[in-house]
Image (cartoon, rainbow, N blue to C red):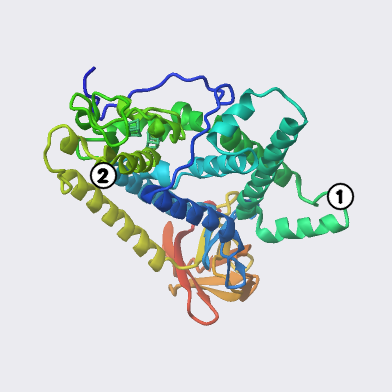
């Protein structure tokens, strides 16, 4: 058998239905599991609590899809501001690429929702049924009243967690007010008074959470997750990966505590690294697509090494360059600087665009039916529809004016346009041109909008035409 040092990932062929060969990992404690628990429960708490956070009297993060207004900490975005979301997604993607190149699949092991929820659901099984051996025995035991009760209790808690997850997801879109008020109404009617789309979303998210965390579990990471598949192209010899020290560990074999036969390596073949693995793989076979880099095998093996009196680190975070080529890992590479430069440009651009952004939008559409007309006073009239959107969190009154130009004047239905926070308003406006003064053909015009306190100003150009009467 050759040393499996290469960072080329092998792909396991496992049945997609995880319930047929349910994996019952042994729960282990240790440095990495402590870090993992802190990270996982931090992200879990963040997900559950963020929709309840208020800012300026409104839900701080609220993607109000039905009204196409998206509120993020006092900033209001509309569908046409989608490029901010695209920029943010790009930054997140490049950050993930950079982290993956240097730290491997830390996202998978420490922060991925699939990992967090699977861990949570497995804890429920542990709490109701018991540790790994009890759970394996429980699965094999015939169905009886106790088994039915415990299985039912596990399913019930899973369902409750799925409903809470779905309600949280949906409250990012529907708003906590709508979800919470509807739940309050349970006191008066048997079911919440939600519109159909909320019911459909609740069902989809409940089902997806239950199926992913309760049933598909590691199969999601191994068979479906695209990130798990394409990560191998991002790995290089300096990527930090969980590895088994093949040279130190082999040939593996059992022995009595404290003894260390010369013809055996440090691996005592205790199988603890396999038993704690949430995806059921054996890290000693080399890097595999099923390895989510949770480091449970490191903690388990370190515990074993402590017990038998060997040095820790038979399984450890290391790089291929260090492990196989016995060289120092090269952290600073052209690739790192390229990623950093790209991220710097993207973050700088996004911050500049956000700080420079005026939370007021004006859009001008010309009357499509007629380019221009002649009124009874002999003036040429051009008609437009001006759409104003107040993207602030407060009510404002806006004034529209025409940038001064000889021979042109503006006529409005209202001098002041009061708009609530996030409100849009379409208003018909006309520009009149004196044919004795203005040039034939097209004349550039500019409409200015200013808030009553002078804080927000925007302008938009269009043209005034003498043609088409
Ligand atoms: S936990 Fe360590 S000693 Fe035990 S089988 Fe795994 S690698 Fe070998
Ligand atoms: S092999 Fe180790 S690091 Fe990889 S998933 Fe299994 S326990 Fe986690």
Q: Position of residue 59 (x, y in %)?
A: 60, 64
Looking at the image, residue 344 sits to the left or right of residue 208; the answer is left
Based on the displayed image, in which of its 4 quarters is residue 460 positioned? bottom left
Q: Regarding mark 1 in the picture, which secondary structure is present there? A: loop
> Which residue corresponds to the image point at 55% horizontal and 30% vertical from the top-left?
216
Q: Position of residue 409 (x, y in %)?
A: 52, 72
Based on the displayed image, in which of its 4 quarters is residue 209 positioned? top right
Q: Regarding mark 2 in the picture, which secondary structure is present there? A: helix
Identify the residue position indicated by label 2 in the image. Answer: 102
- The relative height of residue 464 versus residue 114 in the rendered view (above or below) is below
Q: Quadrant of ligand 2?
A: top left
In terms of depth relative to the viewer, which is nearer, 344 or 453? 344
Q: Rounded to the nearest whole Å, what is the CA distance between mark 2 and mark 1?
A: 53 Å
Q: Position of residue 160 (x, y in %)?
A: 69, 45
- The relative height of residue 468 versus residue 228 in the rendered view (above or below) is below
Identify the residue position indicated by label 1 in the image. Answer: 190
- The relative height of residue 353 versus residue 125 in the rendered view (above or below) is below
> Which residue corresponds to the image point at 77% horizontal and 56% vertical from the top-left?
182
Kindly identify which numbered label has been placed on residue 396: none
Q: Is mark 2 within 8 Å of ligand 2?
A: no
Q: Is residue 379 visible?
A: no
């Amino acid at each position: 058998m050759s040393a499996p040092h290469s960072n080329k990932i092998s792909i396991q062929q496992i049945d997609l239905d995880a319930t047929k060969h349910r994996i019952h990992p042994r729960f282990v404690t240790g440095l990495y599991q402590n870090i993992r628990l802190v990270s996982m429960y931090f992200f879990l708490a963040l997900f559950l609590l963020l929709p309840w956070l208020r800012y300026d009297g409104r839900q701080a993060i609220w993607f109000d899809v039905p009204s196409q207004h998206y509120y993020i900490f006092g900033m209001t975005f509309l569908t046409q501001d989608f490029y901010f979301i695209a920029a943010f997604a790009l930054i997140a993607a490049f950050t993930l690429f950079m982290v993956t190149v240097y730290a491997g699949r830390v996202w998978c092991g420490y922060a991925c929702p699939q990992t967090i929820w699977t861990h949570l659901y497995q804890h429920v099984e542990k709490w109701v049924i018991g540790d790994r051996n009890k759970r394996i025995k429980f699965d094999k035991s015939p169905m009886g009243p106790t088994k039915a009760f415990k299985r039912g209790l596990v399913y019930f808690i899973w369902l409750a967690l799925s409903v809470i997850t779905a309600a949280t997801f949906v409250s990012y879109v529907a708003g906590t007010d709508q979800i919470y008020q509807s739940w309050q109404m349970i006191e008066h009617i048997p079911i919440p008074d939600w519109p159909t789309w909320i019911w459909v979303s609740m069902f989809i998210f409940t089902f997806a959470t239950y199926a992913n965390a309760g049933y598909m579990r590691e199969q999601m990471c191994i068979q479906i997750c695209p990130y798990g598949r394409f990560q191998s192209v991002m790995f290089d010899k300096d990527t930090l990966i969980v590895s088994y020290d093949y040279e130190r560990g082999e040939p593996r074999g059992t022995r009595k505590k404290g003894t260390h036969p010369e013809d055996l390596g440090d691996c005592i073949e205790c199988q603890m690294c396999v038993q704690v693995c949430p995806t059921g793989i054996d890290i000693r076979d080399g890097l595999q697509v099923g390895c989510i880099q949770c480091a449970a095998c490191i903690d388990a093996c370190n515990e074993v090494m402590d017990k038998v009196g060997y040095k820790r680190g038979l399984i450890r975070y290391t790089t291929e360059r260090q492990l196989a080529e016995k060289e120092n890992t090269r952290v600073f590479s052209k690739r790192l600087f390229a990623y950093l430069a790209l991220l710097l440009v993207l973050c700088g651009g996004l911050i500049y665009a956000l700080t420079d952004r005026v939370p007021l939008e004006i859009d001008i559409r010309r009357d499509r039916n007629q380019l221009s007309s002649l009124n009874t006073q002999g003036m040429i009239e051009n008609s437009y529809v001006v759409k104003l959107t107040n993207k602030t969190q407060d009510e404002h009154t806006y004034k529209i004016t025409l940038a001064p130009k000889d021979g042109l004047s503006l006529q409005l239905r209202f001098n002041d346009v009061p708009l609530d926070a996030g409100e849009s308003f379409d208003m018909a406006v006309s520009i009149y041109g004196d044919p004795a003064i203005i040039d034939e053909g097209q004349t550039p015009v500019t409409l200015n909008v200013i808030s009553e306190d002078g804080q927000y100003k925007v302008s938009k150009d269009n043209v005034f035409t003498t043609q088409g009467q």
